Image (spheres, rainbow, N blue to C red):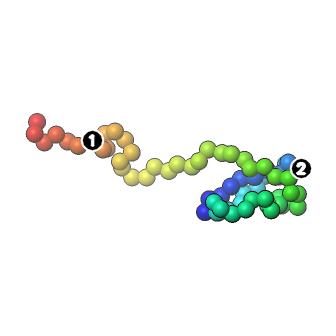
Amino acid sequence: MPDYSFVCEECGAHFTKHLGFNQNRSNLVCPNGHHHIQREYTAPQVNFKGSGFYVTDSKKTDKAA
């Protein structure tokens, strides 16, 4: 389940909620009790771990040469 960032349109509070993909977001409330919130869209986190992410890592060696 991903974390979503929200900002309150009334007080400007920024907060994060841990929600499922099919969970209803219409009943969300900011930490100060306001109901007018907007989701913030941010760049996704990408973590490259290990080998295999570069062109040189996935090339097969030519043993016939």
Q: What element carries label 2?
A: loop
Determine which quarter of the picture holds residue 35. Answer: bottom right
View extreme (top): residue: 65
Identify the residue at image location x=63%, y=60%: 21
**Amino acid type for the residue under numbered disc 1:** Lys
Above/below status of 3 relative to 10: below
Taking the image as shown, residue 15 lies to the left or right of residue 65, namely right
Q: What element carries label 1?
A: loop
x and y percent of residue 17 in the render?
71, 60
Identify the residue at image location x=73%, y=62%: 24
x and y percent of residue 63 in the render?
13, 42
Taking the image as shown, residue 53 lies to the left or right of residue 1, namely left
Identify the residue at image location x=76%, y=56%: 15
Quadrant where the image shows the N terminus: bottom right
x and y percent of residue 49 in the render?
43, 52
N-term mark: 1 or 2: 2
x and y percent of residue 64 in the render?
10, 39
Above/below status of 10 relative to 59: below
Identify the residue at image location x=46%, y=49%: 48
**Dot 2 corresponds to which residue?**
10
**Amino acid type for the residue under numbered disc 2:** Glu
The image's mark for residue 59 is: 1
Taking the image as shown, residue 38 lies to the left or right of residue 11, namely left
Taking the image as shown, residue 23 lies to the left or right of residue 30, namely left
Q: How far apart are marks 1 and 2 (CA)?
A: 54 Å
